[in-house]
Image (cartoon, rainbow, N blue to C red):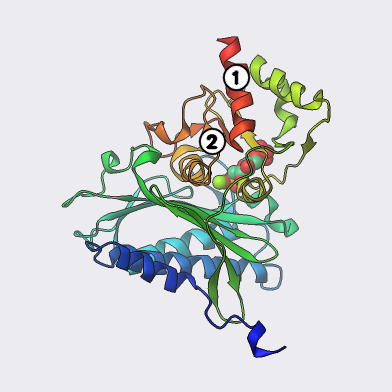
Amino acid sequence: VGSERINTDIVTLTRYLNEEQTKHKEATGDFTLLCHALQFSFKSIAYYIRRASLINLGGLAGSSNVTGDDQKKLDVIGNDVFIAAMRSSGRVRVLVSEEEEEAVVFDEYPDARYAVMCDPIDGSSNLDAGVSVGTIFGIFKLAEGAKGTKEDLLKPGTSLVAAGFTMYGASAQLVMTMRGGAVNGFTMDNALGEFILTHPNMRIPKKRAIYSCNEGNSKYWEEPVLEWVNSLKQAEKPYSARYIGSMVADAYRTLLYGGIFAYPADKKSTKGKLRILYECAPMAMVFENAGGQAVNSKMDRMVEVIPEHIHDRSGIFMGSYDEVQKVIDIHKKHG
Ligand code: AHM
Ligand code: MG
């Protein structure tokens, strides 16, 4: 390979974060440091997932989390890795994890100004089969002197300063966006140990005939949802169905190829399945910033939904602008 064909000026996540920081004169570097801790947790989780079958990390941990899901050993490890990284950054006042019933308040850092919400390993039912899973995160900036109480956390996605996810697939892919900013995608280069900017300014295609939902639940679906999915199947050229069962992986594909991902609230799960703070809101911010849409089962903008409890759930439809609009239009028709 001739040297002229090698890119010797690559943008790593570290470089990207530094460049972002210099754009904001008032920036103190706290957010950048927090992101460094975040990326370390992604690298660690990716490492453990890759080695899981080799070092006996498959299967259940023998406990269950707040919401009653059986915890996998990797759920526990992912959660511990995440909490340790956030704590040691010294920049986090409070953290919400899917795996922790209560918010974790870091009183050793009373002046820290960030709150982090996360699902350390989303899609863990896929873990033992080696199917892609991911980590989802959202970050709020807190007011000076905030003590990390519930009020600091029960805020809408529009208050997020940054959000994103990492998918642990054939390679680890980190997608991140800041409030009002572009969506950028980074790929982990295992040899360099760095996330490299490979997908700058990601824009979701305006439409695409792919839908992604667990149709096994259709018995419980409300009429508008049934009508919508049926209309996709009866379209002149019927849609393709794709469902991995890891939201991060389904979302990443949807972001790249276009289409729609849905996990509606239904007659059985009237509040939906996915959690607002650390699953729905961060994803919704990513999709909106990439030019798509994200709404809940009442067709409200997902990022405007305010949870009443840190583990509250919601229905969600997110994806290409036109595909989500179809869902909205059918719901409006039903009134
Ligand atoms: P988890 O956080 O316990 O892994 O659950 C969330 C996952 C999502 O990744 C995925 O979209 C959904 O649950 C799949 O649910 P289902 O198995 O009901 O289709
Ligand atoms: Mg989850």
Identify the disc placed on residue 329: 1
Badge 1, how many Cα within 10 Å: few under 14, some, many 20+? some
Marks 2 and 1, the one that precedes in the sequence: 2
Badge 2, how many Cα within 10 Å: few under 14, some, many 20+? many
Q: Toward which corner of the image does residue 3 lie, by quadrant?
A: bottom right
Q: Toward which corner of the image does residue 92 lie, by quadrant?
A: bottom left
Q: In which quarter of the image is the C terminus?
A: top right
**Residue linked to disc 2:** 293
Name the foreground residue: 9 vs 124: 9
Identify the disc placed on residue 26: none
The amino acid on which the numbered mark 2 sits, given as a three-letter code, is Gln
Q: Measure how far apart labels 2 and 1 are at the Cα level.
A: 13 Å
Q: Position of residue 69 (x, y in %)?
A: 58, 43
| Vertical comparison of 264 with 153: above or below | above
The amino acid on which the numbered mark 1 sits, given as a three-letter code, is Asp
Q: Position of residue 270 (x, y in %)?
A: 55, 23
Q: In which quarter of the image is the N terminus?
A: bottom right
Q: Is mark 1 on a helix, strand or loop?
A: helix
| Vertical comparison of 94 with 193: above or below | above
